[in-house]
Amino acid sequence: MADFDVNDNSDIYYQGRYWNDFEVVEHRINERISGDPACPWYEHFARVTGRTFERALILNCGNGWVERGLVAAGLIRQGVGIDYAADLLDEARTAAAQSRLPLRYEQRNINTGVLPAGPFDLVVNHAAAHHIAAIDRVFREVCRILPEDGWFVSFDYVGPHRNQYAPEAWEAAWFVNQALPESVRQDMQYPHLPTMLVTDPTEAIHSELIVETFRRYFRTHEFTPLGGAIAYPLLTHNTRLFELEDRAEQQAVVEQVLEADDRFLREHPESTLFAYFAGTPDKSALERTDQLASWEADETARERQAAEHGGEYYERGALASALIDLDRARIEHERDRARLQALEAEVAALRSDPLYASTNRLVDSGLTRRIRAVPAIGATERRIRGALRKGAG
């Protein structure tokens, strides 16, 4: 794999506040999944399966808050978390030890497809798969290690890769934002692809492939679109809205945004940025050798192409291209300004030269021909006038 399939800087995670940090959003998501605003996904999942799972594998577990919650809720008895970030794993181990929870952790680059030794009867993907480059390889291995009656449950971002939102969704969000009170409008900035490749090269690396790849290897028992095309960009990191002291006004604004989000999802069912889904392994998929080889070849070619293009997998969208072109134009403009300022300084220095002033007085007195007959003075005049013409141009 390439060097953009993992993130060496974990400081970017757990920063800022997201749309589901608003209680009303959390309740809306719960209601979509379970029909009950007070019932989160894991309680709903426990009711649907009717099970307490003996040993769960948690993909890209971060600081371990998900599995600690699953143990506390009684969904799992034991858990194994894997992640690439050593510092986050240390946090997870410390928290688990302090609470005496049956959780252990291993550092791994998940893209190798080498998962911890089982047995596992549950694999949990909570906002993890959208950071996986080798999505086919990993989901295939999850299918292999789970028993026939094992489960794979996911709650994840499944929208456009690298958060390169569709133009119609971004435009709709912009109009909704303009309809909000000015004091709580979002500072809308379209995700800048080159910046993302530096700050977090794994963010939404193949998010739009998650559901498709899940369905290759698992029988889907539940799939619930959660929306977000409008609400996520308007509510996430909206500092002024989070800090609004009038809670009634805050809730009214959030509900206004959610209503627009619901409307957009109804009109554009394919636009969902987030989804909850769960299924059991389809072991027959592992027997289709020709198909497996084709999927593997596609993934290998995709990673090779990305390596040749600095981590970019796909053709840039219209908004991403326009933003990058604007950046280039801005940089060129700044360079031109710097050149002009340097030239103006050079001309100013020439004008302050005593010889320049003397030359001008002589020219004005009608002694031009005699001045030009003196090689040193004539050359100076030509140099000064040439610089002035250049500056004027």
Image: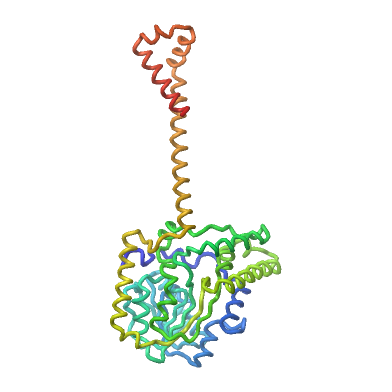
In the image, 356 versus 295, the foreground residue is 295
Q: Residue at x 44, y 48 (%)?
A: 328
Res. 171 image quadrant: bottom right
User: Which of the colour schemes (rainbow, by chain, secondary structure, one colour) is used?
Assistant: rainbow
Left/right of residue 100 with respect to residue 294 in the rendered view = right
Quadrant housing the N terminus? bottom left
Q: Position of residue 347 (x, y in %)?
A: 45, 25
In the image, 60 versus 379, the foreground residue is 379
Q: Residue at x 34, y 59 (%)?
A: 309
Q: Position of residue 23 (x, y in %)?
A: 62, 74
Res. 91 image quadrant: bottom left
Is residue 78 something that shows in the picture? no
Is residue 73 something that shows in the picture? yes
Q: Residue at x 38, y 11 (%)?
A: 372
The relative height of residue 150 versus residue 382 in the rendered view (above or below) is below
The relative height of residue 57 versus residue 227 in the rendered view (above or below) is below
Q: Position of residue 70 (x, y in %)?
A: 49, 83
Res. 242 image quadrant: bottom right
